[in-house]
Image (spheres, rainbow, N blue to C red):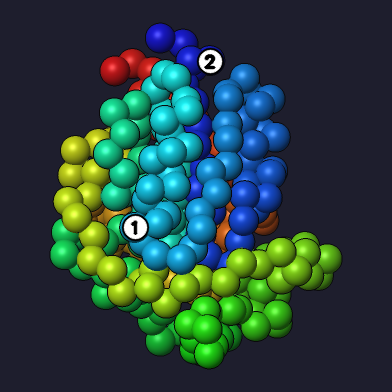
Amino acid sequence: MSLRNVNVVLVHGVWADGSSWSRVIERLAARHFDAVAAPLPLTSLGDGTAALERSLARIEGPVVLVGHAYAGAVIGSVRAANVKALVYVAALAPDEGETVADVFHRGDAHQLAPMLVPDRDGLIWLPRDAFENAFAHHSTASEASLLAAIQRPIGAACIGEPVGRPSWKDLPSWFLVAGQDRMNAPETERSTAQRIGARIHAFDVDHTPSVTAPDTVVEVIVEAAQAASTD
């Protein structure tokens, strides 16, 4: 099986949409990969899992499934048979019975990360200045402004729903640890990667390397695709 037969499905985290993967998609296309950004409703973990399953059902051939941040919980919850490898990008990976809230730890060094409080509709928004200070602090001012403008809030139900048996127990996994992450603690990312038995790649990147360091993300995805193509 050639790498041209391996599909890449990219899943955005919270406060983002599929456009956050644009630079990664461009680079994958240059390497002749078919890549799509799967949309998540960000209303509940179950809703997100169902939406991702629908996206995967439209794809023929093996898939490398990539999740950023919160989406790590979603990619670990799908059961699609065409998924051959998982890539976690600065992500969360709850074990069976755990919730996203259980495994989200900022650490003591993240004073610039904002307080997160649901609004009266139960939605959690990221303050605009947090995009430049914490979410993508390696971005330019214009990039951070764009990220703030397109943000999508997360429903509080997303972080409180326990996951079932995660697919990382059965599939090979890769993990990009973001050493300059101000949203998720890098040490937690590394311990998570070790817990799930992932192949670890650590870079001095911020929380959103798909925007600020897309080449590093592509490097990890291509390695996973090479492994998937030999199965």
Residue 59's disc is none
Residue 4's disc is 2
Q: Quadrant of the C terminus?
A: top left
Cβ–Cβ under 8 Å for marks 1 and 2: no
The kind of residue tagged 1 is Gly
Q: Quadrant of the N terminus?
A: top left
The kind of residue tagged 2 is Arg
User: Mark 1 falls on what kind of element?
Assistant: helix
Asked whether the viewer can see residue 165, the reply is: yes
The residue positioned farthest toward the front in the image shown? 121
The earlier-in-sequence mark between 1 and 2 is 2
**What x and y, as percent, mark residue 64?**
42, 33
Q: Nearer the viewer, residue 136 or 74?
A: 74
Quarter of the image for residue 95 reads bottom left
**What x and y, as percent, mark residue 140?**
78, 65
Q: Is residue 110 above or below residue 86?
A: below
Q: Is residue 127 above or below residue 78?
A: below
Q: Which residue is mark 1?
A: 46
Quarter of the image for residue 73 reads bottom left
User: Mark 2 falls on what kind of element?
Assistant: helix
Q: Mark 1 against mark 2, which lies toward the viewer?
A: 1
Q: Is residue 57 above or below residue 46?
A: above
